[in-house]
Amino acid sequence: MERALREAVWVRSGGRCERLRAGVRCNRPVSRANWEGHVHHVVYSGHGLERLEDLLLVCLECHGVEHPHRTFLTREQQEARRNLRLRRRALELDAGLTRSESRALARGWAWRPPE
C-alpha cells in the first residue's frame, strides 16, 4: 500500500480509530508513532489496488479484535522482541547449539544428541 494512501486514511480519520462498535465509532486516538501498521483493509480482494474507502485507521485494541489470531505490537515492543531474539541466538551460538536444539530445550523437551 502506498504511503500517500496511508496518509490520506490518517487525514480522513483525524488520527482517531474509525472502527464501529455496536454502531458507535470507537474514536480512540491512534499513536502517530506506530499508526501505519493499523490501517485495516475492509475489503481484502483489492490488495495492491486499495481505495481510500476500503481502508480504516484502527487503534491497537480494535485491530486485535478484527484479527484475533495476530498479535499487534508497538514499534518499541517489536524492537525489544527483535533484540531478545538476537541475544538468544548469540547465546545459542556461544553454547554450540543449533536452533532446533535450543528450541527443544526452551520448550522443556529432553534433547539428546544423535547417536
Image (cartoon, grey):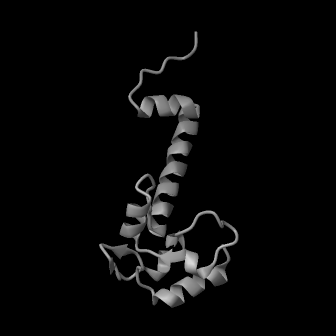
Tell me the quarter of the image containing the N terminus. Answer: bottom right
Residue at far top of view: 115
Q: How many marks?
A: 0
Q: Residue at x 55, y 43 (%)?
A: 89
Q: Residue at x 43, y 66 (%)?
A: 63
Q: Could you say which quadrant of the image residue 21 lies in?
A: bottom left
Tell me the quarter of the image containing the C terminus. Answer: top right
Of residue 5 and residue 51, the one placed in the foreground of this image is: 51
Residue at far front of view: 23
Q: Is residue 107 above or below residue 42?
A: above
Q: Residue 62 at x, y = what percent?
A: 38, 69
Q: Could you say which quadrant of the image residue 96 lies in?
A: top right
Q: Is residue 89 above or below residue 52?
A: above
Q: Residue 11 at x, y = what percent?
A: 53, 90
Q: Residue 107 at x, y = what percent?
A: 41, 32
88 with respect to 20 (left or right): right
Q: Residue 64 at x, y = what percent?
A: 40, 62
Q: Could you say which quadrant of the image residue 6 lies in?
A: bottom right
Q: Residue at x 36, y 67 (%)?
A: 61
Of residue 11 and residue 94, the one placed in the foreground of this image is: 11
Q: Residue at x 56, y 80 (%)?
A: 53
